[in-house]
Image (cartoon, rainbow, N blue to C red):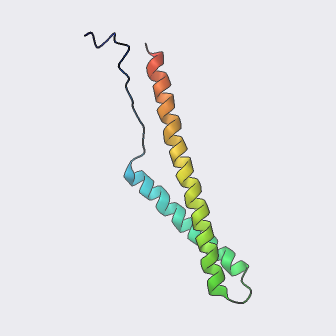
Amino acid sequence: MDLQNSSYITILMRMVFSKKFKFIVYFVVILLSIYIGYVLGVTFCSQNCQTTIFINIFITNVVMVGGVFTLVRLSEKSITEWNDDNYYEKD
């Protein structure tokens, strides 16, 4: 079987960011979202400030970490597809 000319061989190369890079990105996002949630909690505090601060920190963390998670996944998918397109253009 001639492996170089076979149409049955498909090479799947998936680009993923390193775990160290992801950890740094998520850590920075969590720190920033805690700060933003704290500022929002203090700003909109009416009676029970501690509860308001915790709720704002929680909501901000969920939104920001969810958004960054989505962006990282889309970036990995986009770069993988771009690499696949370039791989087939070389032929």
Label tally: 0
Left or right: 24, with 75 as reference point: left
Residue sticking out furthest to the left? 1
The residue located at (68%, 81%) in the rendering is 42
> In this view of the protein, can residue 78 be seen by the observer?
yes
Q: Position of residue 61 (x, y in %)?
A: 57, 66
The residue located at (36%, 17%) in the rendering is 8
Q: Position of residue 51 (x, y in %)?
A: 63, 84
Image quadrant containing the C terminus: top left
State the image quarter where residue 54 is shown. Answer: bottom right
Query: Please, is residue 43 above or below residue 29 in the view?
Result: below
State the image quarter where residue 67 is shown. Answer: bottom right
> In this view of the protein, can residue 35 be seen by the observer?
no
Left or right: 14, with 79 as reference point: left
The residue located at (63%, 80%) in the rendering is 53
Residue sticking out furthest to the bottom? 47
Left or right: 53, with 80 as reference point: right
Residue sitting nearer the eye, 60 or 36: 60
Q: Position of residue 29 (x, y in %)?
A: 54, 61
State the image quarter where residue 1 is shown. Answer: top left
Query: Please, is residue 1 above or below residue 54 in the view?
Result: above
Query: Please, is residue 41 above or below residue 29 in the view?
Result: below
Residue sitting nearer the eye, 63 or 8: 8
Q: Position of residue 22 (x, y in %)?
A: 44, 53
The residue located at (51%, 46%) in the rendering is 73
